[in-house]
Amino acid sequence: MRYLIRRLGFYLVTAWAAITLNFLIPRLMPGNPVELLISHFKGRISPAAMKSLTILFGLNHQSMLSQYWSYWDNLLHGNLGISFTYFPTPVIQVIMSALPWTAVLVGTSTILSFIIGTVAGVLVGSRRGSWLEASLPISTFFSAIPYFWFALVVLYLFAVVVQWLPLSGGYSSSDTIGWNTQFLLSAADHAILPAFTIIASSIAGWLLGMRNMMIVTLNEDYIILAEAKGLSKARISFVYAARNAILPSLASFALSLGFVVSGAILVEIVFSYPGIGYVLFAAVNNSDYPLMQGVFLVITLAVLFANILADVFYVLLDPRTRQEG
């Protein structure tokens, strides 16, 4: 328990530092978002409204310290501001509309790639020299291909050449958004190609990491003792060796889950998928300070929460972390 309390204190300090950087970084970027907004609407907003928009967006000549305190005050009240890119939609509404798309696509893909890669790593590591090791060069080949290029190749083959799957978007424009069968099937159809590119590109990391740890763990004394007792090879591999070999992969998996909310930006851009990554890309292009801050805040909190979960799992899986002093 003392270990978890110390870690929680560390994460609170980290959260404060990350939120402070979240405030500073967008304001240090060059460009004027008000001018970008006026040019974006191409004459539909009068230049005379620039002063009013500057005050509305909180970009008036306040000191940086005053803006910082106002930022914390709005943050504690759940007010993330108005998005410049999707004006006049509130930032929280933009994020909440994009977050489910990314959470389902990237979250499901990350979990599937972790499970497939980990199980394959256990099998390959426990059967060195067998035909299963042929999966290593195949998986590393896909991970070595540039992410965006692989997505473009997959898109061209399956959406342009054979036309089995949709070309872009998250659902068909003719469908009504809601919990109905037609919309869910359309969303699943549009998610197949992005999910495949994520899984194929990331599975090698989990496989190689687990395979290497299994090789090291299977040479430990307690594994030799289990073999001397006559336990089955499957039980030794999955119950004894895999439980300890998975600890480093578990920490990486927790971080990967934390970054799920950031989305696979390149994949979402290539497939025009309506997720957080695509929203962040649009915010950076338009110097949308409130939207960038909101997205970065969600990413920061998600990563910290994922690390806390990783620490809890470490305590449950590794008795050494429960020992005091």
Image: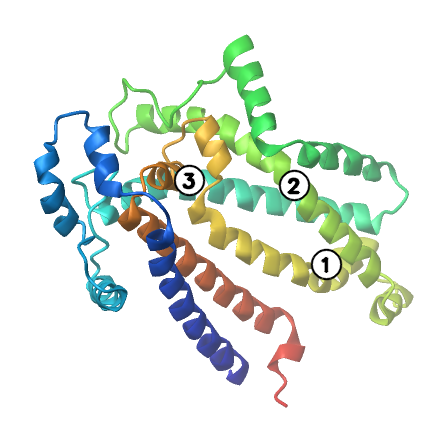
Q: Residue at x 16, y 48 (%)?
A: 54
Depth check, front residue: 127 or 167: 167
Crowd rating for badge 1 (residues with CA inside 10 Å; few <14, some 14–19, many 20+)? many
Number of marks present in the image shown: 3
The CA distance from mark 2 to mark 3 is: 21 Å
Residue at the bottom extreme?
325
Residue picked out by circle 3: 277
Q: Look at label 1 and name its amino acid.
A: Ala
- Where residue 95 appears, x then y in whole percent? 30, 45
- Contact check, label 3 and label 1, Cβ < 8 Å: no
Q: Look at label 3 and name its amino acid.
A: Gly
Q: Look at label 2 and name its amino acid.
A: Ile
Q: Where on the picture, by quarter, is residue 93?
A: top left
The mark lying in front, picked from 3 and 1, is 3
Q: Where on the picture, by quarter, is residue 315?
A: bottom right
- Contact check, label 1 and label 2, Cβ < 8 Å: no
Q: Earlier in the sequence, mark 3 or mark 1?
A: 1
Residue picked out by circle 2: 203
Q: Is residue 223 visible?
A: yes
- Where residue 234 appears, x then y in whole percent? 78, 53
In this rendering, position of residue 6 left or right of residue 207:
left
Q: Residue at x 68, y 46 (%)?
A: 205
Residue picked out by circle 1: 242
